[in-house]
Image (tube, helix red, strand yellow):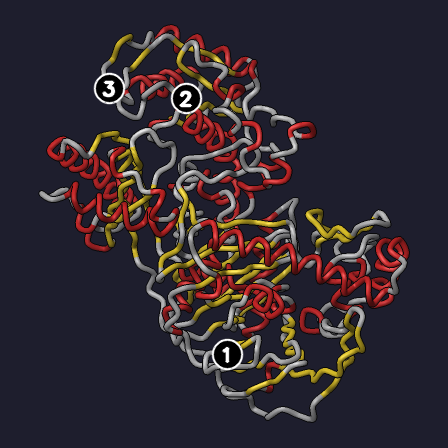
Amino acid sequence: MASGPLSLGVDTGGTFTDIVQIDAGGAVTVDKAFSTPSAPEDGAIESLAGLARNTQRPVDAVLGATARFAHGTTVSTNALIQRSGARVGLIATRGFEDTLVIGRGPVGRVGGLPHAKAMDFLHTEPPAPLVSRRLVRGVGERVTAEGEILAPLDREEAGEAVRALVEAGAESLAVCLLWSFLVPDHEETIRQVAAGIAPGLPVFLSSEIAPRIGEYERMVTTAVAAHVGPATTRYIGKLQDRLADDGLRHPIQVMTAAGGTTLPDGAARAAVSVVNSGPVGGLVAARHLGRALGIGNVITADMGGTSFDVGLISRGAIEHTGTPFLDQGLPVLTRSARIDTLGAGGGSIAVSDGFRLRVGPESAGADPGPAAYGRGGEYPTVTDALVVLGIVDPGRFFGGRYRLDPGLAEAAIERHVARPLSLDAADAAAGIVEVVNGRMSDLIRKVTIETGNDPREFALFAYGGACGAHCADLAMRLGIGRVIVPYGAAVFSALGIALSDIVYAHTLSAPVGLDDEDAARRVARESLDALAGRAEADLAASGFMPGDAAIRYSVEMRYRGQMNEITLDLPEGGAEPGLADRLRRAFRSVYEQRYGASAVRASAGLEIVSLGVEASVVADIPAFAERPSPEAGPGPARRRRIHRRGAAPLDAEIHDFDTLDAGAAIAGPAVIERDMTTIWVPPAALATVDRLGNIEIAPEGRR
């Protein structure tokens, strides 16, 4: 092992908590432990203990040498999904107390649901508001759309509202007043009043959390922050204390959905961006690996125990969205890497009513887990199907640390799938895999085609503990000619978390038309200067100088009258003469690529909606080290029968990854076994191992 500082990345998932160590020489070491939903810090600590055992060093020695501990946590996500966060009190402009209930058209009712469910109006109910109506108060005040104070705020009335909410049981306070992002004075006054009435009460202002146009989305974002922020802060503090006691000398860095990390002091304000942030680490790692391999167009496919996540990297840039849905009816104003998710993982439950076979979205999770785990799981899962088919060796699961019971897997499939469908267990298992592969390939097709991309022009990066068994079949369904299973596939999101830059991002709505270029330049310059000042303050609070960060400027634009924006980069701040023409050309190019030339409406006129500044402190990570040659070459090839539906079993070669040298070529049908994942190479496919330990699969056998 190379001496020098270590970088650690930890990703807490629904089933496993993954950890990655990158040493000063670029060598990557990985481990994982079962997640502990009731006390997620325990899973993180246990994964660290496993890594220490793996590297034959005590935990305090590992942490003492760690310069960077980056973490992707599900605490915010779970608090939101389970509605177990802080009880939120909300203060709004009088007359707008019911904004969260009314929503914005169908957005508040079906937004965030799968398309099929969203269209089923008879069986779709609107979600309960995140804030109970009894915990909402209105105050008299009004700021106009031009930023003028039409009616001042009455401090006494604001105090009465705060007292009433505290007496009603509010544990945190969200404040969202009309047009407050233009004039935040009234919201800041309410915070001062709250500090005098209830010291220690967490207060979240929409003018700080989401200074963006869109009253409903801004209020949702602020309410979500107030709901999950306190729990996120407590968890990070608790984990920080435990790690510090064990020898960590630096603050934890927390992964955000934008693709970077923030330091603990910013975790409360960035709590909305922490929700669903774990999978974004995989996109960061895929971009890093794509650069190393010279691949700019990448589809990322992350299949773990509970879900299947798909992302897109086009020309080396991660696709982002400005208003992701965190749950049904909860659109939030935060920049987030676009990830589409499906309830399809190794733990996805398969059932049949005798007429059809359904796989997921329900998952067996880590406890009780698939039937083969022997922990009391009654229903069969995708993992059980792979065991019955012969793709997964029950004796080598998790590197042999956990033995699976093939008898329990077969019995569960027989009882809940095979018997109802009058099939034998092997055919039923093959059907389970076909159904889940069909669902996953449909999602990939949707993600690429919706953004104007052809999946055949992309490489598929397949990671997560379960994806290696499915990725070649997915590629064949989609016509993708190149599949990469990364060396750290089973812990790839944790790897990306370890690679992530520290990022501080700020956005401000400043609506202005491009027809008046002087006004557009003035508004852009003033807004960008204000945002840059906020980013510099964040850097200073974290101990960085402005010169330590790379600054990125952006603008969100749309045709006048539209409701959705396109984000464009602004090189060097971009507010110099010629701004309007440059923005028109750039907007048209992106718009045509995404929606087609016939959708262009130049006569409608363009408007700037928001501007953004992002300050990134680049992580000091060495290039990946080449994988050392195995000490011993491959032994005699083992063979195993792989069952297929409606066809004779295949006689497949079984390869131990640890014995394969760089350049090794493996023709299908074959199985490559690793400690934490299994890779299926179908007939006619060809797999090769590169110098970094990645496995490249050509589904049709071409190289």
Residue 71 visible, this angle: no
Residue 405 visible, this angle: yes
Q: CA distance from mark 3 to mark 2?
A: 18 Å
In this view of the protein, which residue sits in the foreground, 496 or 355? 355
Q: Which residue is mark 3?
A: 147
Q: Residues within 10 Å of mark 2 (few under 14, many from 20)?
A: many
Q: Which residue is mark 2?
A: 175
In this view of the protein, which residue sits in the foreground, 53 or 616? 616
506 vs 202, left or right, is left
Disc 3 + disc 1, Cβ < 8 Å: no
Quadrant where the N terminus lies? bottom left
Q: CA distance from mark 1 to mark 2?
A: 51 Å
The part of the image, by quadrant, that contains residue 454 is bottom left
Mark nearest the camera among 3 and 2 is 3
Q: Mark 1 or 2 closer to N-term?
A: 2
Q: Residue at x 82, y 60 (%)?
A: 374
Q: Amino acid at mark 1?
A: Gly
Q: Which residue is mark 1?
A: 693
The image shows residue 236 at horizontal and vertical percentages of 49, 45
Q: CA distance from mark 3 to mark 1?
A: 57 Å
Task: Give the number of the disc on residue 558.
Answer: none
- Outermost residue, left side: 577
The part of the image, by quadrant, that contains residue 127 is top right
